[in-house]
Amino acid sequence: MFNAELHLSFRAITLHAFGDEDRGDPAEPIVLELGNADLDDSDDEVELHPNGPPNDYVALLKRNSGLLLLQENRIRGAYSRSGEAGLFALFVTGNFKNSLREWANAVLRNDGIRDISESGLDAYIGLELAISITSINEISDFWSSKRFLGSSDFADTMARNRFQQIRSHLKVHPAGGY
C-alpha cells in the first residue's frame, strides 16, 4: 500500500514515499527541496545532456531543479533501469497504481464499461500530467485537430471518450469505502 507524508518547514519540503519498488530506507526522504538561497552558485561549466547517460540526466535535474537528492544512488538506479518512468515510480508505486486500478475497475464494471489495463492507467496518468501543465480550458480541445489546438499525441495515446470514462470513474478509495 502507498503512504505519503508531506512535511513542511520554512526552508524545506520533504516527501516521504513508502511502497514496494526499490524503496531503500523508508524513513529517509528521496528528495529535499531547497530555496534558491541554498543552491550552489558555482560558475563551473559542465555540459550535461538530457538524453545522455543516466548520470548526465540526473545531474542535469539536480543542477536545474533546486533539489537536494538524499538517496542519489537509488534515484540514479531507478533512472538507469527505467528512465523517467523509474523516477516517477519512486513516488507513485506499483501497489498504489494497482489499488487505483482495482477501485476504478470495480466502478467501471458496475457501469458496464471495460476495465483499465495497467498500461491504460499509465497512459491516463501521463495525459493528466500533460493536461495539468497546459493552459487549454476544454478537455475536448486537447484532442482537437483545429489549428493551434490539441496535439496528435493525445489522440495517439488514448481516445478522448476513454480518457473521460476513466476520469469519471477513477476513485482514490475502495468502492463503497465512503
Image: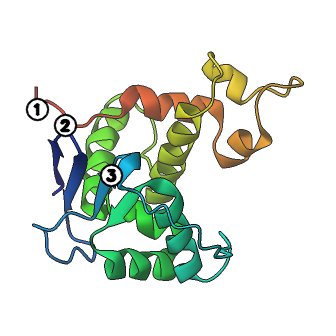
The residue shown at (50%, 82%) is 80
**Residue 27 percent across, percent down from the top left:** 9, 66
- Point out the residue furthest to the right here: 147
Residue carrying label 3 = 34
Q: Is residue 123 above or below residue 86?
A: above
Helix, strand or loop status at disc 3: strand
Residue drawn at (42%, 60%) of the image: 88
Q: Which residue is mark 1?
A: 177
**Residue situated in front as seen by the camera: 45 or 172:** 45
- Label 1 near label 2: C-beta < 8 Å? yes
Tell me which numbered mark, 3 or 2, is placed earlier along the sequence: 3
93 sits left or right of 146 in the view: left
Residue flagged by tag 2: what amino acid is it? His
Pinpoint residue 14: horizontal percent, then vertical percent: 22, 52
Badge 1: how crowded within 10 Å, few (<14), some, or many (20+)?
few
25 up-or-down from 140: above or below: below
Of residues 99 and 132, which is closer to you in this image? 132
Q: Secondary structure at mark 1?
A: loop
Question: What distance separates the C-alpha of mark 2 from that of mark 1?
Answer: 6 Å
Amino acid type at circle 1 is: Gly
Given the image, on which type of amino acid does mark 3 rest?
Leu
Q: Which residue is mark 2?
A: 173
Q: Position of residue 143 (x, y in %)?
A: 72, 30
